[in-house]
Amino acid sequence: MSKEIRPIHVPDIGDYKNVPVIEIMVQVGDTVAAEQSLLTLETDKATMDVPAPFAGVVKEIKVKVSDVISTGSLIMMMESSAAAATLTPASQPHQSAAPAAPQTPTQPATGTAPAASKVAAPVSLGEHFTGKSHASPSSRKFARELGVDLSRVKGSGIKGRVTKNDVQNFVKAALSQPQGAGGMPSGMPVLAMPVINFAKFGEIETKPLSRIKKISGANLHRNWVTIPHITQHDEADITEMEIFRKKLNEEYAAQGIKITPLAFILKAVVTTMQQFPDFNASLDVSGENLILKKYFHIGVAVDTPDGLMVPVVRDVEQKGIAQLAKELAEMGAKARDKKIPAVDMQGGCFTISSLGGIGGTAFTPIINAPEVAILGVSKASMKAVYIDSAFVPRMMLPLSLSYDHRVIDGASAARFTTYLAQVLADVRHFAL
Ligand code: CAO
């Protein structure tokens, strides 16, 4: 049987031009059947698979994910046998509808694409309106075969598209859930959230979550369920620090710099991290090693109208209080104006979440992985503190340190907050 290497072109896809490739389903060397999906394209409305016009072996792939292609573009070279060389009628490009819906009507051939016409005659490309979860037809089929509910799979493809790999990873993760004796899931099963029609109980309004909330929500959820959190609470006597801060504020007012307690806390945290290097670390992917960092970049949670953002102040150990105060104010303003570039939110070693300007006495901040600890700061207040046989009024600052118990022991955490409180009580420690 004679073999022949033949080009595969994009068949007629109607009026669509420069359509991005979002998934390539085959690799060089793969043997494919006629009609098997080779790659998926996505228009702004739909996805469509380009099927193999004949059975054969993939010899060369001429495009990659994100390339844009149109009718007639060369996508692959395939070796066919003489027997397989005849195009099957089904190899025409075809359009299809949403996964839940059956096929849409076939589009007429345009006959305007000479390259495509070498491979395929009239066209009917499958358009898959993907509903809630975006996925190519082949990924949907794959998910259906495995009984996977696509709405539960997080897509890693372009625009959050669910790929076959995502479906595979979802199944792997499900199978690796801890099993008890007899292969039964251990412990209590996690119940699915009930679907409640709130309108039954009174008037409601539906407000979509902001983009920032959706992104931070997914990260917070992962960190909360995968990191064993403990929160250590303490109080720092910042009476002297506050006297000094007010003096500094008078000095720097002319330069327009406002110094809040946060600048001191930032500096005190880094002074403490220098004494406790395990707090400036991340677990590596194997979970068997700690990566210790020699730089001190601190993330600061900023409350914005669209949700929480965590810009990073770099090289805190090299900066003075006034400089830090200036950067904090600029960073907060930029975050609220949505002008923080992504790069300024990367590389943090530790995070501070300060609710001190608002109120509260303590809270449980969620660790910002891959960091191993986060400091929550609540509102300082005057308290009667028993010192040298008498109650004296002192300004006390509440601290809440959440830490990853896989990396940090409770005793280390208590030592960390104790030392941090000492540094804040006497900021001359900054100079040590
Ligand atoms: N105790 C008492 N007063 C405090 C304080 C504390 N711990 N921290 C700040 N203050 C005071 C400041 O001195 C300032 O007082 P004046 O207006 O009288 O000068 C006032 O509170 C407001 O401070 P601020 O909040 O504007 O400034 P900041 O430097 O303390 O904080 C920033 C900056 C960006 C961290 C803050 O604006 C912010 O967004 N905080 C919220 C962070 C958040 O949402 N965390 C939760 C994350 S988990 O969802």
Image: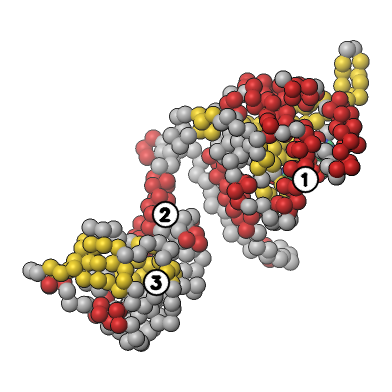
Distance from mark 1 CB to nearest ligand 1 atom below 8 Å:
yes
Q: In this figure, which residue is indicated by the disc labeled 2?
A: 166
- Residue 344: % across, % down: 63, 47
At numbered mark 3, what does the secondary structure look like: helix, strand or loop?
strand
Instruction: Please state the horizontal and vertical placement of residue 276, each as a whole percent of the image.
Output: 62, 23
Asked whether the residues under the numbered discs 2 and 3 touch, taking CB atoms below 8 Å apart as contact, a structural biologist would say no
Which amino acid type is shown beneath numbered disc 1? Ala
Q: To which quarter of the image does residue 354 belong? A: top right
Using the rendered view, name the quadrant where residue 163 is placed: bottom left
> Which residue appears at 64% of the width and 55% of the height?
212
* Residue in the picture at 69% in, 44% down: 301
Residue 374 in view: no
Residue at which label 1 appears: 329
Residue at (73%, 31%) from the top-left corner?
A: 267
Of 374 and 196, which appears nearest the observer?
374
Q: Amino acid at mark 3?
A: Ile
